[in-house]
Amino acid sequence: MIIMACVLFVFGMLVAIATAGFISGSETAVTSASRNYLYHLAKKGDARARKVILLQENMSSSIGTILVMNQFVLYLIPIGSTLFAVKYLSGAETAVLQAVLAILLAVYAEIFPKMLAIKFTVPFALFVAPFILGAVNFLRPAISVLESCAKFSLKLMGIKIDEKNPDDQADEELRGAIEMRRSDGDEEEAQKKSMLKSILDLEEISVSHTMVHRKNLRTINASLPIEKIAEELGNCSFSRIPLWQDNPENIVGILKSKAFFRALQLQNGNLEKIKINNLISPPWFIPETTHLLDQLQNFRKKREHFALVVDEYGDLQGCITLEDILEEIVGEIVDEHDTLTNGIRVQPDGSAMVEGSTPIRDLNRQFDWNIPEEEAATIAGYIMHEVRKIPDVGQIYVLSGFKIEILRRQRNQIGLVRITPPTKL
């Protein structure tokens, strides 16, 4: 009789501890499973992944159910051990039994299952999801009462739990996931990380930080003879050229090189028969505050690749192309017409010789620096914004931890600077 009671007791305790461990591991797996990966599995048709997502979307009910079940099992263990000890054990034996149970509970009802859930988070979550979701549905009435009590207590403390998380939290979580991606010196992996971060940055960067400035904008006077326009197009590597009248900022249309030379071919090379006004398209003006992500979507909607950028007064500031936006993601795109230089020359001592017109984003991306980009698009603009004047050649400043020496100045423009990062100072 005693042997049978001992066997049943041991078996019951092992089942109870295993059940407690299963529930404890379920809590860790369900709360830790990557929602992005689960959505990917659900999209591929995994029904268990959809159940885990349901549990995560109703986290308070899920956690409440798991805790109630866990507490119920943990409540049965001391009751069963106490009844067994009162009937069959002495005082010293009872103390030993309680110590053994405490160790088993700590190891196999808490530590072991949680370690297992952390190691195999998604598989564990997929395995337990049907059981936990069934328990959530079964215990919903009781859990609702307990949730109401908890919410009321939190309300008394002035804590509101019904408010939505900030909209940018998802972006920050995604940025964190990208940063956690290990590259270990792998240039290809580092480039992937840079591209992923650049995609997220598109909705924060305005076209004014990426556009080709009006100073470097290639335009043609629409009043020129057709022969001169043809010559200008022949010497130009761009596919779209703005045409102006009266003054260079009065853009009246956009001329596509392909359309011009196609018309020239149709007229058997007779320039006199070409009507420029029939070939130009209306200019598309956008405000300089437009974000790159919005402009990328606008390019897709209008099936255009070229737009002119204006400020709040309607004055021309430059142009933005689809290629400019793509370069923000993948880096510099060099073709046979581009000059193989980006205005940056790395020096043996770790410093860099940088042209004043170099975009700050190019520097930050190439060297993983953190020069502020909020107030200026180019390094020259950043220097003048910080020092509040046009510096002279030879002057040295320390801005945001970077040592910056002015090497060349052309009239009122900073032509060349030497930048030494903080680690090289």
Image: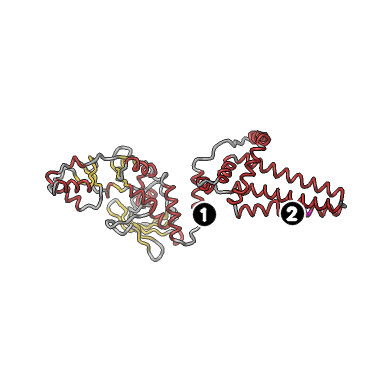
Q: In the image shown, does 16 or 280 lie closer to the viewer? A: 16
Element at badge 1? helix
Q: Amino acid at mark 2?
A: Leu
The residue that appears at 83% across and 52% down in the rendered structure is 4
Earlier along the polypeptide chain: callout 2 or callout 1?
A: 2
Q: Tell me which residue sits at (16%, 46%) in the image.
A: 266
Instruction: Provide the residue designation for mark 1.
Output: 180
Magenta span contains residue 334 = no
Task: Note whether residue 116 is visible.
Answer: yes
- Along the viewing direction, whichever of 194 and 87 lies nearer the viewer: 87
Residue 134 location (% of width, % of height): 64, 41
Q: Nearer the viewer, mark 2 or mark 1?
A: 2
Q: From this view, report whether residue 92 is shown above or below residue 50.
A: below
In this picture, residue 417 sits left or right of residue 6: left
**Which quadrant holds the C terminus?**
bottom left
What kind of element bears circle 2? helix
Q: Is residue 35 left or right of residue 189?
A: right
Circle 2 sits on which residue?
104
Q: Are marks 2 and 1 in contact (CB under 8 Å)?
A: no
Near mark 1 (Cα within 10 A), the count class, few <14, some 14-19 or many ≥20, is few
Q: Which mark is residue 243?
A: none
The residue positioned 37% from the left and 58% from the top of the image is 405
User: In this view of the protein, which residue sits in the foreground, 83 or 398?
Assistant: 83
Counting from the top left corner in percent of width and height, residue 366 is at 40, 57
Distance CA(mark 2)–CA(mark 1)? 36 Å
Q: Which residues are magenta?
A: 99-106
**Residue that protrudes farthest toward the bottom in the picture:** 348
Q: Is residue 102 magenta?
A: yes
The chief SS type of the magenta part is: helix
Estimate how packed mark 2 is, as few (under 14), some (14 to 19) or many (20 or more) residues with alpha carbons within 10 Å.
Answer: some
Observer-nearest residue: 13 or 421?
A: 13
